[in-house]
């Protein structure tokens, strides 16, 4: 019987504790409201002074289908005596590799050269100059406060370490080795935050976006990133076919010069020996005609191979269908001021409730009796 009564008392005690908590919060409602208002003011401050960003994006669908047949091109090539039956699809660069291209040093160095049109500037400014020269940087109060409060330890450490002045002369380095200066390294790290790529494997599209403090500059950066990405992918895709085309083009030019030289030699010999019928002249003419025939055969065959190589480059060139082109944004993407204010409001309420409920416990731990007087029991 006593156990049953004890069991019945547990929910009642819990209910009494909950009621006590609610009463305690109600008695200290003014303190909670004050804390919440302080957080709301802080949220408004953060929302107003956060740096403004505009985002521009584009959506592309890479055509990755394998070439099963050359279609009408094979028929046209067959008429010229060119066989395209052995020409298969080139290597396919998977879209999952695209973010690696964006993160590569050569890509970022090319992107740093992007000319940007800024408000109040008569001439375009490169992205590199925009982030390395103080004259293009706008003062932001929130960033300055953050730098000398939360970021103060980093500022002190950087001041102690100093700037690494080690330089590598580009002329003494192999062209295959990339060299980044101190400023280029900083801009490259910033580009990782400014330009992003989302690959949707399920639906088969790629979305590229870029952010800048000004809308037109954001659109220009996104467009340049799109063009560079297509260029890098195209160069990789047709690298083998383009190399083969260059090789055949060189051999074709050599064969053409040799063919024209043999043709000229034969014509000059025939004209010079038109009235002579000696056996020696006939043998020499036959020799020149044989050399001319051989040179003509080689030249003709290389001409066919050259056309075949050109067709191969055209067919290996990847196609990107731009579903949504880059558009100059009309609304800022950051900061979302309404959302910031709402978040700080809820954060202030939770902070106020936590302060009222947690201060007595903290006061007991640190034996601060005067702290308990701040809370109404």
Image: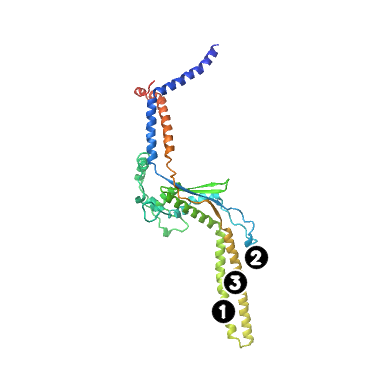
At a point 53% along the width and 11% down the height, the residue shown is 2
The residue drawn where x is 55% and y is 67% is: 249
Name the image quarter holding residue 362. top left
Instruction: From the image, tell me which residue sits under label 2.
Output: 78
- In the depicted structure, whether residue 294 falls above or below residue 139: below
Seen as rendered, the residue at the extreme front is 330
Residue at position x 62%, y 82% in the image? 285
Q: Nearer the viewer, residue 43 or 233?
A: 43
Mark 3 or mark 1: whose residue is earlier in sequence: 1
Residue 101 horizontal/vertical position (percent): 50, 51
The colour scheme applied to this rendered structure is: rainbow
Drawn side of residue 255 relative to residue 156, left or right: right
| Residue 167 location (% of width, % of height) | 39, 54
Circle 1 is placed at which residue position?
Answer: 264
Tag 3's secondary structure?
helix
**Badge 1 density bin: few <14, some 14–19, many ≥20, Cα 10 Å:** few
Crowdedness near tag 2: few (<14), some (14–19) or many (≥20) residues, C-alpha within 10 Å: few
> Which one is earlier in the sequence, the residue at label 2 or at label 3?
2
- Label 1, label 2: how far apart the Cα atoms are: 31 Å
Q: Residue furthest top?
A: 1
* Labels 1 & 2 near each other (Cβ < 8 A): no
- The relative height of residue 128 versus residue 273 in the rendered view (above or below) is above
157 over 358 or under it: above or below:
below
Q: Which residue is mark 3?
A: 299
- Label for residue 52? none
Q: Quadrant of residue 28?
A: top left
Crowd around label 3: few <14 · some 14–19 · many ≥20 (10 Å): many
CB atoms of marks 2 and 3 within 8 Å: no
Q: Secondary structure at mark 2?
A: helix
């Amino acid at each position: 019987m006593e156990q049953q009564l004890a069991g019945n008392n547990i929910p009642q005690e819990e209910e009494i504790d909950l009621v006590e908590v609610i009463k305690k919060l109600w008695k200290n409602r003014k303190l909670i409201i004050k804390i919440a208002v302080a957080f709301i003011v802080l949220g408004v401050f953060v929302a107003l002074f956060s740096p403004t960003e505009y985002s521009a994006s584009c959506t592309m669908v890479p055509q990755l289908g394998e070439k099963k047949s050359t279609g009408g091109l094979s028929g046209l090539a067959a008429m010229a005596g060119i066989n395209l039956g052995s020409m298969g699809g080139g290597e396919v660069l998977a879209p999952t590799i695209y973010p690696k291209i964006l993160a590569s040093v050569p890509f970022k160095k090319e992107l740093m050269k992007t000319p940007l049109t800024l408000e109040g500037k008569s001439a375009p400014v490169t992205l590199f100059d925009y982030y390395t020269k103080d004259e293009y940087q706008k003062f932001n109060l929130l960033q300055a406060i953050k730098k000398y409060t939360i970021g103060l330890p980093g500022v002190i450490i950087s001041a102690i370490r100093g700037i690494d002045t080690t330089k590598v002369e580009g002329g003494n380095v192999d062209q295959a080795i990339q060299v980044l200066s101190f400023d280029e390294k900083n801009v490259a790290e910033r580009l990782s935050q400014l330009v992003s790529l989302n690959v949707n494997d399920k639906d088969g599209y790629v979305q590229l976006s870029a952010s800048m403090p000004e809308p037109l500059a954001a659109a220009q950066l996104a467009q340049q990133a799109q063009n560079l990405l297509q260029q890098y992918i195209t160069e990789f895709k047709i690298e083998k076919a383009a190399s083969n085309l260059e090789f055949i083009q060189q051999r074709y030019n050599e064969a053409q010069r040799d063919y024209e030289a043999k043709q000229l030699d034969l014509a000059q010999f025939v004209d010079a020996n038109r009235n002579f019928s000696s056996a020696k002249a006939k043998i020499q003419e036959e020799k020149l005609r044989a050399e001319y025939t051989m040179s003509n055969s080689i030249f003709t065959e290389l001409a066919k191979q050259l056309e075949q190589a050109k067709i191969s480059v055209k067919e290996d060139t990847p196609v990107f269908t731009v579903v949504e082109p880059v558009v100059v944004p009309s609304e800022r993407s950051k900061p979302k001021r309404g959302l910031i204010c709402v978040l700080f409001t809820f954060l202030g309420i939770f902070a106020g409730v936590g302060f009222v409920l947690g201060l007595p416990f903290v006061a007991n731990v640190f034996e601060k009796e005067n702290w308990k007087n701040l809370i109404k029991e």
